[in-house]
Image (tube, rainbow, N blue to C red):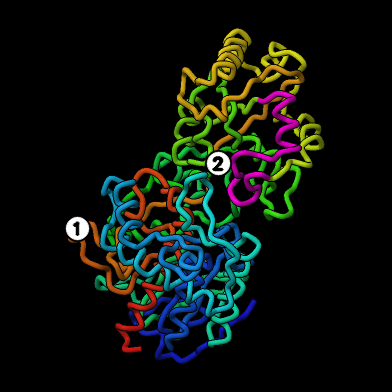
Amino acid sequence: MKKLSVLVAASLFSAGSWAADIVKNVDVVVVGSGASGMAAAVEAQEAGLKTVLLEKMPTIGGSALYIEGTFAVETDHQKSMYIGLDRDWAYKNHMEFNHGFINGPLIRKWINNSANSIKWMEDHGVTFHDVRTLFEDGYRTWHIFKDGKGVEFVNQMAKSFKEHGGTILTETPGTEIIYEDGKVTGIMAEDVEGETYQFNTQGGVIVAAGGFINNPEYLKKYGIRSDYLIVGPKTGRDGDSLPWYDKVGARLEGMGTHLAIGAWLSGKDPNTQLSQPEHTTVYSQLASLLRQPYMWVADDGKRFIDESQAPLWMNTDPAVERVGGSYFAVFDDTLKDYMINEGIDVSHSDWVRVGHKLDLLEEGIEIGQEEGYVYVSNTIEGLAKKMGVDPVAFKKTVEDNNRYAVNGLDEEFPKDRKYVRSISKPPYFAVKGDNATLITLGGPSTNTDMQILREKDLKPVEGLYVVGCEVGGIYGDSYNLTLEGMASSFAINSGRFASQHIAKKLGK
């Protein structure tokens, strides 16, 4: 781990300073090396600000390593593809989706700058290979990173940051902000060896800590189910910064909002189900079955939603939560052969795309049975027994579904008739899925410069900024998946906004 040189000047340990093994005066400290933290660090260091990036984990990147692409409108990529979406339309879409329960001025600034940030990333060596959507008639705002992963973004940002003289300290979490006379003047940190640091900041501390999705205590406190499957890192993202917000009297909002990310193989780590679009795996193909729009049933053996809603996680997640947090995707041998020979009808995000032929499905069904989330039977009654659902209700559900397929009309949910498929040829299959989530999406209210606002007067806390998924007021009660890639886009843009404000404040 890279170390800072020890400063022993006695003058640094004045009556008002905090005891530490190492003391350093810098312009900016960024806490967290995900998408927002990396963007903030690069923007600050390249503006001539002496910047230190603290990361509590052994490696950098956080949730950014798991992102597939990022939102923007009015980019050169879109223009070259005759995609005519503009900033005004995107702003109105997001405000209407969230019924106005969000920070309008900040949303406007972010969307207006989204195209500029695509260019900024490309200038730093980040490549985009497509502009996509998950939906048949969706908006093409999702700029897909090389290989459909954020790895290149993290690597290129880190390279630029270090080339411009920035310092990255891994396994060194921020432990406490230095808050005196209503102003944040620095932060304490401690490395894995127990050595303590005091960073005195001239410009400010930028918190990009990644939320609290891995902290069951905070999840319970803010009303998020703690047994969600978690996509992304299983350590870190613990809400370490939440006491800091209490300390400065920050206004919090949206603490129960999180990025639900659909259902994944029941009881299995979702990270095993990720893949590159051109190189799918057994597990990613099995997970794609949970997105197919044919017949889903809950534990009572009954349907509960129009299955063609599958790509709209912000709709399917609460529907699945209503029926217990899990469901079964059911299909027959005809549909199995269709998915193997013709391809799937709904994408499993960007990991398994529409039309991909599930060449590993036969192998996957065998593995899924062994691991306990795939069920196979030659009879409907036998399948119900293996699933543990009410056999009478399940048999009726299948019979009703088959009648709808013959008539070409879904009488329960007006699903597009092309997705109303018969389940009549044995063997019959069911795959069990559990809801999953990626990140929390609530935190302190801010102004458009990412300064944290106090609860008592909504005035900014001097010297303290928050960026990325810990910013409150960006979403209402759910993530807006219709504008795909928003979480990463806001993270990157908000990180830049914070550093730009500090640079301007310091005359850089």
Sequence order check, earlier mark of 2 and 1: 2
Q: Is residue 495 above or below residue 353?
A: below
Which x, y percent locates residue 436? 55, 41
As drawn, the residue found furthest toward the top would be 392
Res 393 quadrant in image: top right
Residue nearest the viewer, comparing 365 with 2: 365
Which x, y percent locates residue 339? 71, 36
In this rendering, which labeled residue sits more in front, label 2 or label 1? 2
Query: What count of labels does the image hold?
Result: 2
Left or right of 181, for residue 112: right
For label 1, the residue is: 456
Is label 2 in contact with label 1 (beta carbons under 8 Å)? no
Q: On the rendered image, what quadrant is the C terminus found in?
A: bottom left
**Which kind of residue does numbered mark 2 sit on?**
Ala
**Which kind of residue does numbered mark 1 sit on?**
Lys
Residue nearest the viewer, comparing 403 with 199: 403
Q: On the rendered image, what quadrant is the N terminus found in?
A: bottom right
Res 162 quadrant in image: bottom right
- Could you tell me which secondary element the residue under label 1 belongs to? loop
Q: Which residues are magenta?
A: 331-355
For label 2, the residue is: 436
- Which residue corresponds to the image point at 36% horizontal and 63% vertical from the top-left? 111
Badge 1 local density, few (<14 within 10 Å), some, or many (20+)?
few
Q: Is residue 266 above or below residue 480?
A: above
Residue 250 in magenta stretch: no
- Can residue 318 be seen here? The reply is yes
Residue nearest the viewer, comparing 135 with 316: 135
